[in-house]
Structure formats: structure tokens, C-alpha cells
Image (cartoon, helix red, strand yellow):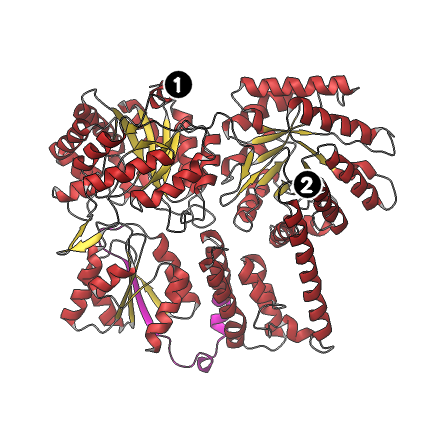
Amino acid sequence: MTKKEFREYLSKGAIVLDGATGTNLMAAGMPIGVCPEAWVMEHQDVLYDLQSAYVKAGTNIVYAPTFTGNRIKLEEYGLEDRIEEINTELVRLSKRAVDGKALVAGDMTMTGKQLFPLGDLMFEELVDVYKEQASILDHAGADLFVVETMMSLQECRAAVIAIKEVSDLPIMVTLSYNEDGRTLFGTPPETAVVVLQSLGVDAIGINCSTGPMEMVELVEKMAQYSTVPILAKPNAGLPELEDDKTVYKMTPQEFADAAVALVNAGASIVGGCCGTTPEHIKALSDAVRELPIRKPLERHRRILASERKNVEIDLDGGFIVVGERINPTGKKKLQAELKEGKLDLVRQMAMEQEENGAKILDINMGMNGIDEKEMMKSVIYEVSSTVDCPLCIDSSHVDVIEEALKIYPGRALINSISLESEKIEKLLPVAAKYGAMFILLPLSDEGLPKDAAEKHRIINTVYDKAMALGMAHEDIVVDGLVATIGANPDAAKECYETISYCKNDKKLPTICGLSNISFGLPERMYVNTAFLTMAICNGLTMAIANPSQELLMNAAFSSDMLLNRPDSDIAYIERMNMLAEKKAQYETVVVKKQPDSAAGDSAGTNTNGGNDAIFQAVLKGSKGSILDEVKKVIDAGKKPDEIINESLIPAINEVGELFNKKKYFLPQLIGSANTMKHAIDYLEPLLEKNDTGENMPTLVIATVEGDIHDIGKNLVVLMLKNYGYNVIDMGKDVPCEDIVNKAIEENAAVIGLSALMTTTMLRMKDVIELCKEKGCSSKVIIGGACITQSYADEIGADGYSKDAAECVKLVEKLLQK
């Protein structure tokens, strides 16, 4: 099926997907811990009967049981050499089951390994893993692809890029969201929509993790941004434990009634995930089949995105500053650090620019003495995990920009594409492939345009070529091309003319680099500021500037307010309050600082973190600088245990609070935890025996038998080790007997159990029962995506933790008792 045919198919009315596969296979006898794909290969009649029943119930699209059929997952069962056989045969099995009455989607999901920089798996490697499976599924005869139950937007991108490189089939993508409406990595649904539809997916949505009613609000948010159909595949409510079995109690009719709410919210593709049966799908099909569906948006919204945040560029909205600081040109200190491979200054610049009001950050690594492509990639990884601002990729080399766009976990802006041959022929297709927006620079092979007419011609030519590649009107921002007023007295007026032409005639936003206008003049800031305010009045949308220049930024906020742009008065007041607060904080520090306290300040005696460089390094995840700061305070006479207790522990506590408040997300939490671990590893050999007092308690941590997910468990281990606990990490898929025996052998104070799947959470109860049988006195705490406090109470666990930061507090509380 072609993408065009698929879009037409989806436009006819509500499309019904199948229901659960895993929970129904378990009910049919599939044991915990086996490879589902291999088990289905040996029990083909079970899947055949299930999928035939789904089609009879009204299913239009059935998912082939290839969910964990990628090489990395199959390696865990020693089946990687059978990857082609398994995926091919399972697609053919689903084809036989549907008998031409439904489409078959090749099903793909996470590998279970963490991407760099959180893990060791490189993005390019993951793309290759997905390409292998996608190619097999395509050749096996799948009608389309579904990438489902994803937690990481970056992994979704890898799968989509991989599929598009080997197949022209349609692609649907669904992510799983937590109770707070974000994925594990902090991505809200509207950001997932913006990023993935820009990559060319044909439907996007949500599956698993919750029941249908909990998805309604998320679907409504997606509908405000989506130009493609929205998909919802919820569980049959939340799992409950009954007679030692995990059950879903939502009836088919209750499920169908809730599905109607999902369709009304904007979902035109609906089905079921965990706990749903053919009966649920039959009720759903009957309920939604004749419902009118909401059409996707006809026009794109002009939005850039990081992994965690959208930034909308509105022709009549607030003025946007693109931070220019992460550029080595003229910055000797930054050049020196980059040559040494250090990124501390880059991280600092990113955070300061975001704090000072930049909405987008320009990244340029053009300098001698470094590999620009590799440094650009390193900086993107660093900045993306440090701040929420979307990025503008700035380079003279097409290959550098392409590598940057490939690994960037969001939707970036390219700076820039002109009518110069190499840019228009090579870079424009790259922008289309990776779904990027771009700055249209009105230059050609002949150089600067001679007059306004030629400038307009260049703008229109590049615009038309972008449209011919399938890009959208909203993908383009035009550079006003600021010349130097000292060389051309009409430079400002010519730029204003371009800005007005783009806004009023072409309905396109504009951007410019401010500093060119004042080159060679004294007191340039006054010229830049005056130019900016006049440009904003003429319709300028964005500028590449230094957000730490208060006069410039204050003028921009004031201009927005004078033009009565939406919420500009509130934005102005908030900025002035922020500046006043920063000034007051600075004055307080200066006044209170004693003449002889310099060493103490650098040594980290301020436990609230205000002037404590070690505290700040952990808070900001500055792994590259933490040891330098630690060595400074040791040389100043501070003891290792004092550093741990007065700087490191308070810092990681603060990180935990920020995580709980949803100001930090998984990347920042892991970054800070790894930074602290770096310092602890250095300090540990320096600790005297009496520094640590009594031996810290031993904790045994494991993912339960049958479950091969360990993202959350690994983070819990890291955090607990940072707090000094003796943590024994038993890994994933660990039998109950092994866990309890290890706890008894090590006299563990606490056993920590993790499970991500509803089918394996029952093993937690088995561990608790075995502890009672063997007289193991360890406290048992549990956690995982499918785990709740009520489940912990039901099975007799000593505690439940929803995340790693909370787990530390839970352990402390239990051990105090």
C-alpha cells in the first residue's frame, strides 16, 4: 500500500485496530520469560485463531507479532541468527489469518538499550538495527509499519529514519505516556507530533500505559498540532491482582464507550492494548464505525522542537531571540576548550542563554584544529541534554549539517540555505528528509543580490524548489540579509523592505543577524538596539543575538508590548521581575561575602549551593569540570566526607526535587547522577575508614524473572550508589530464588524489584512469599511503569517508589524505622 493510498483509506472513517497480543498469548499458555516470537512460531494456531477473531470482530489493521523481533532483543534469547526467518514467517502467518480482509502492520518497538549519551548505543547503530528488521518486514509482505510502545522520541526517530531508508510503506508511531502526560524522557504529546510528522509519518498516537479515558486529554492536545491522523490504543483500564493473576476488569462495553470519547477528542484510528480481547474490539468497532471523525489540520503550525519543548514561530506573536553564543569565532577561551575536547563552557553558555530569554540556540563549530563534524555531534548531545531550547544548526558544510540533523532529538532550524548550487541541490533535500525548518538566505552563485527585485526573485526561487520537494510553507524563515550601515547608508532601509515584503506579501517570518549593521562603528550596542526596535516594528520575527545583552533584550520585550502582541505585557513584567531578582541576589552575595572567605566559597561550605561550584556542577551535570572543583577544595584542606555530605548529597537531593517537580527529566537526572558518581569514584579511595562511620547497608536490586527491561532499575542503582549504599545489581530477568538467596547471603537490608510488564509484575509477589518461607528479613520495595501503591499494598511490599529520586527517600525512611 502506498502512502497516498493509506491516507485515502484513513480519510473514509474511523479505522479499527486489533487488541492485545501479549496478554492473550499468556492466557493461551505462553510462559513468562520466553521469546514471544519464537513461542508463536511453535504455536501458530494460537495466533491464527486470535487474529482471525480480531478480523471477525471488525479489525481493519492487525499487528504482526514481530514486536521484539529486532536483533538486539533476539540476542537476549540467542535467536539473532533467525531474525529473517522469524520476522518473515510471522508476517506470513498474520497474512494467512486476516485472509485479505484486513491490513497487516509490521510491528517494531524499543531494543531495551539506552542511546548515547545516556547509554552506550550510538544513534547510527540503532538506525542500522531497525533497518535490518524493517527491510525483512517489507520483503515479507507487510502492508505498513507500526512503531509502538515507545518511551524515547529519539528511538522513534531512529526507527522512522530506518524504515524510510529501506521502504516506501506507510508508518504509524505510538508512544507511551506517564500520568503527568509526558514520556519517561520528558516528551509531551504535542512535541512528539511536531517532530514525527515532520519526518513524514502517516499516523501518530498513544498506546499502552493507561486506560482509554486517561488518553482523552492527550489526544485533544495532539489534535491541535497534527496534520496526520491520530491513533489511540489504550489498555482495558489499569491492571489489578486477582487470585494471583493480573486482570483487566474494564468490560467490552465500558471500553467501547470510552473509545467514543477518544474519537470525539480527535483519534480516527482506535484499538486495544493490554487486557483487550476480540470481545472488546467487537464492542469498539460497533461503537465507532459510524462516528464522524475529526480531520487532521490542513496547514502546519510553524514550530521547532527539542525533545521536551515546542517553540512556535508566529508572524504576529512575540519576538524570538536565537542565542548566538555557541560559536567559537572570536572566542579564544571557547576555542581552547573545544580543542581539548571540553564542553563545560558550551554547557554554561547554553544554560545562560536560555535563562536570559533565548528561545532557540544557534550551534556553530566552525574553527581550525578540530573535526567540525564530530564536535558538532558532541555539542548537540551535550546541549540537548542540558537545556530545553530547540537548536539552530549552523555550518558551511552540508555533511556537517546532515550529521547534526540525523542525531538531533527534535526538529531543528538550518542556518542556512541559499540559491548557491551546493546548498540548493544538496542541502535542501537533506532538510526535507529530516523534517527540518530552514533559514532562506537570499544569495545566489552570483553573490549578493543587486537590488530588491533580485532578492525577491531568489526568495521565490528557493521557496518554489522547497515546495516541489514536498516541504510546507511553514518550514521557511527568510534572512533579511543585514548589510553594514558604514559601507551602505541604505542598509537598514533595504533590510526593512525585505522584512515587510516577506511578512506582508509572502506571509513568511524573517530573521537577521543584528551585529552586521553596526560593524566598524563605536558604541555598537546603541545602533544594534535602535535597528532592532525599528525592524520589529516592520515585522521582524526573530534575530540571532546575544541574549545576555540587557539593553537589546529589554528593547525587544518593550517593542512587543508597544505593538500589543499576545501576552507581551505579562512577558515584559516577568522579565523585569527576573532581572530585579537577579540583581538582588547578586547584591546579597557581594554584601555578605567576607574578605577572607574566598577559599571557603570555592570549597563548597555553602550547603544551599549558591556559590558552591561542586554543588552547581552536579546540579548542571557538568561531568567534565567536577573533578577540577573537587581537587581545588581538597587542596584547600577540605575532607572527602565533608565534600560528600555538604556538597554532593545536597546537590543530588536538589536534582531529585527538580525531577519530582517536572523541571528536570530523565536526561538531566542521569546527567547529574553520573556527574556525582564521577566525583564519588574519585573521593572513595581518599576516604579514611573512620570518615564513613558505620558500614552502609547492603541493597539487592533486580528486574524480576521474565522481564528484560532495566532502564528504571539502572537509574535506581546509580542513585543509591551515589548515596553510599552497598548496592548489588543482579541485572534483569532474575529468578525469585536467586534474588532471595543473594539477599540472605549478603544480609541485605532491602530488596528492590523492578517490572515494566503487567505479565511479570506477579513475580514480585513470589519474591515476597519466598522471603517469608526462607526467613529473609530484607525489606522489599517495588517499582516500574505498571506498578502502583495499591498493588504494593496488595502483595505486602514494604514500599513503592514511582522513580529513582523517590526511591532514595523511601530507602532512607525504611532504614530509619
Say whether residue 17 is left or right of residue 187. left
Q: Secondary structure at mark 1?
A: helix
**Image quadrant containing the N terminus:** top left
Is residue 278 found inside the magenta-colored segment of the image? no
Residue 32 percent location from the top left of the image: 18, 48
Locate residue 147, reporting x and y percent.
35, 35
Q: Which residues are magenta?
A: 680-707
Point out which mark residue 564 bears. 2
Which residue does the image show at 61% across and 38% down from the upper left? Answer: 392
Total label count? Answer: 2
For this view, does 289 lie left or right of residue 481? left
Q: Mark 1 and mark 2 in contact? Answer it, CB < 8 Å.
A: no
**For marks 1 and 2 on the same chain, the one whose residue lies earlier in the sequence:** 1
Point out residue 810 in the picture as x, y percentages from the top left corner. 36, 68
x and y percentages locating residue 246 in the rendered image:
18, 51
Q: Nearer the viewer, residue 82 or 310?
A: 310
In the picture of the structure, the residue carrying the numbered disc 1 is: 4
- Whole-number angstrom distance, CA of label 1 to CA of label 2: 43 Å
Where does the C terminus fall, quadrant-wise?
bottom left
**Could you classify mark 1 by the number of other residues whose Cα lies within 10 Å: few (under 14), some (14-19), or many (20 or more)?**
few
Viewer-closest of 539 and 597:
539
Q: Is residue 310 above or below residue 779?
A: above
- Residue count near mark 2 (Cα–Cα under 10 Å), binned few <14, some 14–19, many ≥20: some
Task: Pick the residue in front: 705 or 582.
Answer: 582
The answer to whether residue 6 of the structure is visible from this angle is yes
Q: Type of residue at label 1?
A: Lys
